[in-house]
Amino acid sequence: MLTDLLEKFKRMNWPLTAFMVALIVFGTTFIWSAGSARQGAFLQNIWYSYACTAVFGLFLYFVLATLDYRKLLDLFALPGYAIALFLLAIVLKVGTKTYGGQRWLWFFQPSELSKFAIILFIAHLVGPAGRESFKWFLVAGAAFAVPALLILKEPDLGTALVLAPAVLVMLLAARVWTKGLVVLLLAGILAAGLVLGTVYVAEQKTDPDRKAEIYRRLPLKDHQIKRLRVFLFPDQDVKGAGYNLRQALISIGSGSVRGKGLTKGELKALGYLPPAVSMNDFIFAVVAEESGFMGNLFLLSLFLGLLLSTLKIAFQATEDRGRLIALGVATLIFCHTYINIAMSIGLMPITGLPLPFISAGRTFLVVLMASLGVVQSVSVHREEEDAR
Amino acid sequence: MKTSSWFILALGALFVFGELVLAISLFRLQVLNVADSRESQEIQTIRRVRVPGLRGRILDCKNRVLAECRPSYCISCNLEEFQRRGAPSNTVAAIDAAIENVATALDLKRQINIRQIERHLRTASAIPLIAWRDLDARTFARFCERLDEFPGFIDHVEAERTYPYGSLAAHVLGYTGRGNAGDPERDPVYFSEKDMMGRSGVESYYNRFLAGVTGERRIRVDARGFRPTKARQTMLEEAGDGGMAPADGLDLHLTLDIKIQADVERELHSVTGACVVLNPRNGAVLALASAPTFDPNSCVPYLSPEVYASLTNAPAKRGQNRAVNEGYAPGSTFKPITALAGLSTGWMPEDEYNCTGVYRLGDLRLHCWNRYGHSYVNIRQALEQSCNTFFCNLGTAIGSNAVIKAAQAFGLGSRTGIDLGGEYAGVVPDDEWKRRWYNEPWYPGDTCQMCIGQGMLLVTPLQMAVVAATLANGGDIYRPFLYDREHLSAPKPVRRIPFARDDIELVRRGMKDVVDLGTGRSIAIRTDPEVTPNGRHRRYKLNVDCGGKTGTAEIGRGETKRKNTWIIAFAPFDKPTVAIAMVVERGESGGKTVAPRVHNVLAGIFGENEISAVYATSSSLEGRD
C-alpha cells in the first residue's frame, strides 16, 4: 500500500507541481501587497486565507493525483456535472449579488466549479473510441451549452468565453465532427470581427440617434458595448468607462524594467487603480507596477512552464479521456492567463476574468488545483512504454 | 489514440506564441514607452504647491522698519483625515462638525463657514484648510496644549504683514492682500497657498522685489485628491523630489525719513490735503503724505468690506493718495513759472506794471486779491505780493504758448515717474485740449486764468514739489523716487529747464522775499528769538533762510465755492536740501492755513539738526552748484 503510494509519487510530473506552487507563492505575495493598501483587517489579511486555501488545495491536489482518474470519471463525471448544473440554476435564484452579477453561493462561485465539472464530463463523453460522429458533437455541444447559458445568465461572460475554447480544443482533439468544428471556429472569429467592426462604424457616426440605432441591433448589453468601445478607443473616456484600463496601463507602464518594489505601487496605494479590482481581475497591473518587466517575464515563464508540463502529460497519456482532460485544463488556464493579461494591457476588450493562481479568487484556486490534481493523476496512471 | 502528437505540439506552439505576444506588448509598454506612463502618473499623482518666500521688509533711510512680517498663529485641519464615504458633502459635513467641535472646546468664534470648506475641498483638498488664522498667543497656546484632543487638526504658523508705525506713510507703503501670484491658465496643476501680494503703494510697485522667488513643494495625492494618510505615505517614497526651496524677498530701503513723515502727518492731521518733501539734489522723496489716512494693519490679511468702504467712500477717500493721484489747481504757486516764462520771452526784471486791484480784458474783470491794488510793481515784487493783475498782464503780453511751454518744461501735464502706481499726469490746457474737452476755442481770459494758476490747470502736489525742488537747485529736474540705489549714489537730472540762470535766480530771490516780507512770512524758520545782551540785534536759535510761494486756488461757484490752499518752499536758500509742496483743501489762504504747517515741518527738519542719510550720501555733490 505504502510502496504503491510511493510509486505513484514517483510517477508524478514534479515540474508541474513546482510551477504550480511557485505561481501560488507569487500570487499570495501580490495579494498581500495589494491588500496592504486597503483598510481593514479583513482585506489586509486576504492573503492569509488565500494561503490557507492553497494548503487545502494542495492536499486535494495530491489526493486526486493518487486516485485513479478513470474510476473517478466513471463514478463521478455525470453526478458531478448534474450537481454543477443544479448549483448554477439555484445561484440565479438565491445567489449573492456583487458588482452587477449574481455569482456567489455562500462562500464559492458555482461557475468556477462548473469549469471543472464540464471539462471532466466532456472528456468522459467524447473520450471513448467511436464517438466521432455528428451525433456526439450534438451531445457534447448540449452538455456545454446548458451550463454555458446558465453562466451567461449570471452574467459571467468571461467564464463562458474561456470554457468555449477549452471545450473546442477537447472536441478537436477527440476528432468529433472535425470539419464542422473548423467551420464553427471560423464563424466564431468572423462574428467577433463583425461585432467589433459594427461598434467601430457606429462610433464614427456623429448623429447620436443613428449610433443608438446601430447599438440597439447588436445582441450585446450596454456595459459590453462600452467595453468594446474602450478597447477600440482607449483614449476617449478615460474618466468613465476607460478609467480602469487607463489606470492599469499607467500602472503597468510606470513599472518599467525593474518595478517599484513590493507594496510600493503608487497607483494601487493611492487608489487610482480601483481597490475593488486591484486584487482580482486587475491584479496583473499591481504585479507589473511592482515587479516590472523582469517580474512579468518571470511570471509568464512560470505560466508557460506550467502549461508545457500539462501538455507533456497530455503527450505522455496513454488513454484518451486523460489526454483530453489535460488538454482541456491547459487550454482553460492558457485562455485565462492570456485574456486577463491582454485585457490589462489593452490588447483585448475588458472581461471579468481572474488571473490563475494570482488573483484572490479562492473557489477558482481550489478548482485549478483540483483540475491539475486530476491531470497529475493522468500522469501517474499512464501505462509505461516498457510495461506494455 | 485519437489525438495526434502534432495537435498537442501545435497547441504548445500556440501557447508559446500567445505568451510571446504578451511579452512583446509588455516590453513595448514597460521598456520602450515607459516615459509616457511615468509622465501620466506624475500628472495625476503629483500636485505642485507654490511656497512663497518670506516677504522682505520695508525700511526708511535710517533703517527703521516700516513694514515687516510677524508670526500669525493658525489652526489648520488635514482634510484627508476626515474623509467619509459617499458624496463629498459627507466629508464637508464631517469637517464642519470637527471645526465646530474645536470652536466649542476652545470657545472660539468661527472664521470659515461650510461654503468655504466645500470650496477648499473641491479645489485644494491636498493642502490643509486653515480654520483659524491670526489667533492671539494665549488661545494658540491653549490649542497646542490640547492638540491630542483634536485629531486631524494641526498648529501652524504663518507669516503675516505688519506695519509697526501704524498709519504713518500708509499711502507710500500701501498694504498687502492675499492672492494667487501664479498663472492658473498656464499651470493648472499648481496649488497655491495664497501668497502675500502688494495691493497698493510700494508694496504693490515693488511686489516682485519684496516677494522673492516662490518655491515649489510637490505632494502626492491619492485618487480622490487627498494627501495619502500617514500609513500609506510610509509605503511610498518621499514625494519631496523635484521641489524647489523658495528664496526670501529682499529688504526695500526707501528714501523716506519716518521722522519727517511723522512731522508732516502731524501737520496734516484733521485736514484734507497732501504734502511731499523732496531732496532737491537728487529727487529722493523724504516724506509723502495724504490726509485723511488709514492704518494698513487693518487691511491685512484681507480687506474687509467695511475697511474697503472706508478707503473708497467720498468725500474722505482715505485710500486715495492725494499727493500723487489727485489733481489740484496750483493757484499762485504757479506764478514763479509764469514769471520765468515772461523773463525768457523778453520781459525785463525792472519792467513795472501798475496794479489797480482789477485787470480788465475786454468785458472780463479780474480782481487782484488786494482790492486796493499793489500800485507799481516789478516782477520780483509781484512774486513777493502775489499780484494777480501783474501776472495776468504779463501772460497776455507774452501769450499763452510761452506759459504752456514753461509749465511743460517743469514737467506739469505729464507724470513725474515716481515709483508709485496710478500717478495722475495733471492737465496743462491749451487750445487743442480745450476744443477737445469743452468744444470751445481758447479765450484770452483762459491765458489770464492760467497765469495765476487757476482755470483748467491741474497739478499734483508731487509735481509742485518737483517744481519747488527744481527752483531750489537752480533748474535741474530730477525724477522723484522712493527707491533707487543706483541713482542715490550718482544722481543725474532728467533734464534742465530751458531758462537762463539769472532768470531762475531772480525768481528764487522773489521767492525768498515771499518768506521774508511777503505773503508767506509764516514759513520763515526763525525760532526762539532772544535779544542779544547789547539789545540791538535779535538772535535766533534757529535761523534758516528759505524761499517759498503761497497759493490760494478758488474753485467751484456759489454753494460749492471753496479754496484749496498751497505752499511750495525750499530751504536753506543758498544750498537747499529740502523742497516741499503742501496743499490743504478748503483752507483760508496759503499764507494763513498752510504756511504755519510748512514752517513746523521745516523747523522740525532743521531744528533737530537731523541730516538724513540721504543728505549724507549726496554730500559729495556739495560743490556742484
Image (cartoon, helix red, strand yellow):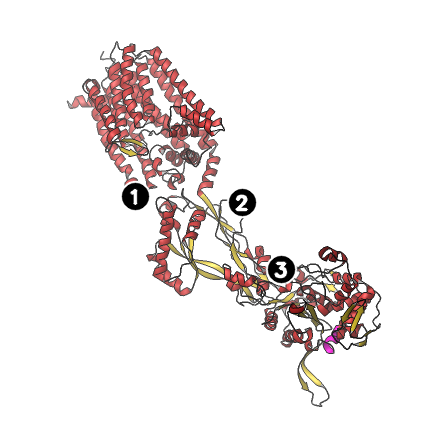
Q: Are marks 1 and 2 in contact (CB under 8 Å)?
A: no
What percent of the width, then of the height, locates residue B316? 58, 66
Q: Which of the pair B527/B95 is nearer the observer?
A: B95
Q: Which residue lies under the disc numbered 2?
A: B185
Q: Chain of mark 3?
A: B
Q: Are marks 3 and 2 in contact (CB under 8 Å)?
A: no
Using the rendered image of the protein, determine whether residue B288 is visible from the camera's viewpoint.
Answer: yes
Other residues around mark 2 within 10 Å, as few (<14) / some (14–19) / many (≥20): few
Q: Which of the pair A326/B129 is nearer the observer?
A: B129
Q: Which residue lies under the disc numbered 1?
A: A40
* Residue B352 sits above or below residue A68 on the image: below
Q: Tell which residue pokes out farthest to the left in this image.
A: A1
* Residue A252 sits above or below residue B126 on the image: above
Mark 2 secondary-structure assignment? loop
What percent of the width, then of the height, locates residue B520? 71, 75
Mark 1 secondary-structure assignment? loop
